[in-house]
Image (cartoon, helix red, strand yellow):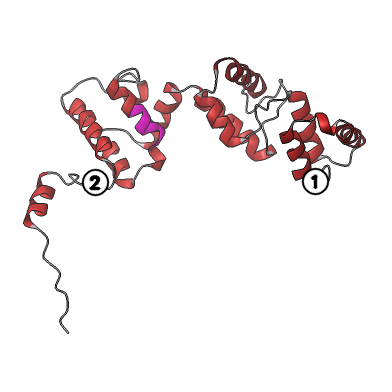
Amino acid sequence: MTKDIEAPPSPHLQKLAAIDPWWNPLWDLHWQRNYYRARDHVQAGHPFDPAALIPSPSTALGTWITRACLHYHQLHPDQQHLLTLIGITAEVAHTRTRRAHPWRTAVEHATTFAETHGHLAVPRDTIQDGFPLGQWLNKQRYRTRTTGPTPAAHALTAIDPWWNPPWGMAWQNAYQRARTQPHTPATRRWITKQQRIWPLLHPDQQHLLTAAELITA
């Protein structure tokens, strides 16, 4: 029985790698082509300060740079290395992302709040690390209901699917209080009311109540 003999690497592949080590990257070529445009832009001496939004996010090259910065931590380590070669480090990527998308800072505060409390049903006067989170969330709810989902809204939904429920926030706030303080007199009165108006509740409200075992279906 003869063993299979591995063919030696093609000399053509070696020549290609010598010309460009990234001629056949693990990621898609669209990303690589755009990277080369950014690299050529830098090497040509054109203005380039990603942290200061140069080139502008409104340009084709700036749009790609902003997107690369936004997804920096999901990129392959070799992609991160290539970006570093043109001055885009993790810190630069974070700075550009926050400047290009100011709402990202607010989402970071929302994430911190949710990690502590488990939800985003916050009173209007809620302050998170000096940021008026309650007011900002109310603005996002109004904007989403009037103009449709925004990038910020999508990010908030990933944090708390019920940050902007189809019912009033008064109910959602009361639900969160009941979930965390189920045995207080106020909670017992609220639960009794929900049982009384059960047929009038939204199906998702009913689901939340039964999933939290506040009411037995």
Tell me the quarter of the picture where residue 117 sits: top right
Image spot of residue 205 (x, y percent) = 75, 34
Local crowd size for mark 1, using a 10 Å CA cut-off: few (<14), some (14–19), many (≥20): few
- Report the side of 27 relative to 14 (left or right): right
Q: Which residues are magenta?
A: 65-71
**Residue receiving disc 2:** 25
The disc, 2 or 1, on the residue closer to the chain's N-terminal end is 2
Q: Quadrant of the N terminus?
A: bottom left
Residue 96 colored magenta?
no
**Residue receiving disc 1:** 213
- Name the amino acid, label 1: Glu
Tell me the quarter of the picture where residue 11 sits: bottom left
Label 1 SS: loop
Image spot of residue 125 (x, y percent) = 71, 20
* Towards the viewer: 36 or 158: 158
Q: Residue at horizontal 18%, vertical 23%?
A: 45
In the rendered image of this protein, does residue 33 appear above or below residue 24?
above
